[in-house]
Image: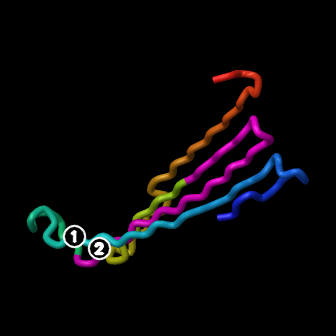
């Protein structure tokens, strides 16, 4: 993760970048008590996430996060890329004269 990358000389506007990788292997023995299709090898679940956050002064901010997930089944030589894709975007503006 890269934190506080200044965009102005006084640091009032800055950028933050980051990311994360999650991997998990799943294997089911006797799926559905042996009545369902049986997989002897299991499969990998992978998820990749990146995000960016830009602050323009104290009153305006943009945030974006993108996630990509996939399942890879090596026994079937099947690669299901971009199985799921999520985008989250946020913009925030504050009025310095408004009291809460």
Report whether 73 appears left or right of 9. Answer: left
Where in the figure is residue 85, as x and y percent of width and height?
51, 52
Residue of label 1: 28
Where in the figure is residue 76, as x and y percent of width and height?
33, 73
Picture quarter containing residue 44?
A: bottom left
Categorize mark 2 by other alpha carbons within 10 Å: few (<14), some (14-19), many (20+). some
Relative depth, front residue between 63 and 76: 63
Residue of label 2: 42
**Who's the residue at 18% across and 70% down the image?**
38
Categorize mark 1 by other alpha carbons within 10 Å: few (<14), some (14-19), many (20+). few
Helix, strand or loop at label 2? It is loop
Is 84 covered by the magenta stretch?
no
Report whether 30 appears left or right of 7. Answer: left
Residue 86 disc label = none
Is 54 covered by the magenta stretch?
yes
Report whether 50 appears left or right of 38. Answer: right
Report whether 96 appears left or right of 76. Answer: right
Instruction: Specify the segment rendered in magenta.
Output: 40-66
Helix, strand or loop at label 1? It is loop
Whether label 1 touches label 2, CB < 8 Å: yes
**Who's the residue at 13% across and 62% down the image?**
32
Where in the figure is residue 91, as x and y percent of width and height?
66, 37
The residue furthest right is 9
Where in the figure is residue 71, as x and y percent of width and height?
40, 65
**Who's the residue at 63% across and 47% down the image?**
64
């Amino acid at each position: 993760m890269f934190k506080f990358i200044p965009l102005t000389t006084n640091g009032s506007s800055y950028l933050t970048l980051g990311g994360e990788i999650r991997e998990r292997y799943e294997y089911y023995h006797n799926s559905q008590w042996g009545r369902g299709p049986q997989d002897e090898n299991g499969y990998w679940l992978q998820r990749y996430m990146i995000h960016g956050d830009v602050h323009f002064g104290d009153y305006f901010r943009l945030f974006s996060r993108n996630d990509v997930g996939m399942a890879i089944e090596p026994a079937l030589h099947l690669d299901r890329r971009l199985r799921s894709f999520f985008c989250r975007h946020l913009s925030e503006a504050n009025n310095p004269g408004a009291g809460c």
